[in-house]
Image (spheres, helix red, strand yellow):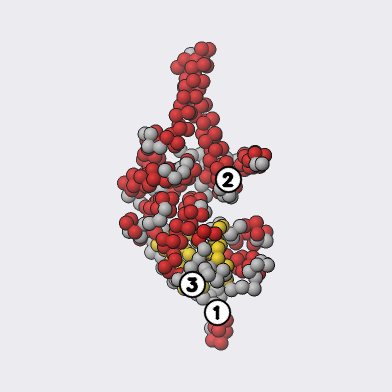
Amino acid sequence: MSNHPINDPHDKFIKNNLSRIDSARSFIETYLLDRINLSIDLLNLRLFQNDSVDTNLLEYLSDLIFCTETIPQRRQFYLIIEHKSFPDKNIGMQMDNYIHVIRENHAKSDEYKNDLFYIVPVILYHGKRKWDISRAIPPIGRFDGEISRFAQTLNYEFFDISRIPDDRIKGNALLRITFLTLKYIHSPELVTKLNDILVIFRELAKERDIAIDLNAFSLYLENAAPKSIRKRLLQRILEWKNGGTNMEVSRVFQTVKNEGIAEGMARGKNEGIAEGMARGKKEGKKEGKIEEKTEVAANMLKRGMSKCLIYEITGLSMKKIDQIEREQGKQRP
């Protein structure tokens, strides 16, 4: 079990997975395009960069704002993806803050400041309770009588993941893993659905190294699944790793085991083989876990993920993450 509980694990899990451009692109193609009736340039889809926003506005910026252009007009298009695990009456104020940041940034753009632009807010919901908030968020404040002409209503697209039938969950492998996990994260039924999710991980492993995704998935279950089933879920994942289902995933575990035993046997000459092997194996596992987390953090930095998110997922100190970032900088030509 992890010794570093994750704050807002639902939020971290979604941001870790949907911040990948391939997953965001898959979500837009699979679920959103038919609703918004716009043609957009998916090939040039990118994350809205925090460093382009004034410092005093950063606190309002969602980590999942994407931007691209419409086709053929080449007008700027922004997509806000906000996640909720419970009905939130403050959603209007949050969305208004995000839109304010986008407008401020757009006004400063030399390329687009005089052009029309589009902002589409999206809410991904997977709570236990029914979402009882209007899809058209009423204006912030009260507007009665003549003053009502100044009221502005915010509309958003809404997806209740918890009520999408399994056979309607589509998209690329990581998006399907994300939606299936979110759908069942509050339910003991997740135990029986885990095998279906691991099958998709096998599919994902054909495309890339899945160590980061599997690590984030395991940490999410450890922090967000019902406590009564967490141990069973993590044990099943460990069995899957060690079962040779994916050589890349099981490599770390085998290395830790071999190095721990080897060190223990060396120490056994002086301390007694049994005691030395036990101690060496324990220390070898500890070092192996640190090396694995360091490798995960390095890969996450290469993919442009925030250091705060890396800290939450890996448990490494910010000092260690800064060190990894500096070492990567030295390696660049």
Query: Is residue 24 at all visible to an observer of this figure?
Result: yes
Circle 2 crowding by C-alpha within 10 Å: few under 14, some 14–19, many from 20: few
Helix, strand or loop status at disc 3: strand
Where's the N terminus, which quadrant? top left
Distance from Cα at disc 2 to Cα at disc 1: 44 Å
| Mark 2, residue position | 302
Whether residue 112 is situated above or below residue 62 in the rendered picture:
below
The residue at the point 66 percent across, 41 percent down is: 333
Distance from Cα at disc 3 to Cα at disc 2: 36 Å
Percent x, y of residue 36 = 46, 70
Nearest the camera: 203 or 83? Answer: 203
Percent x, y of residue 54 = 67, 61
Query: Is residue 91 at all visible to an observer of this figure?
Result: no
Percent x, y of residue 163 = 35, 60
Are the two marked residues, 1 and 3, in contact with CB atoms closer than 8 angstroms? no
Helix, strand or loop status at disc 2: helix
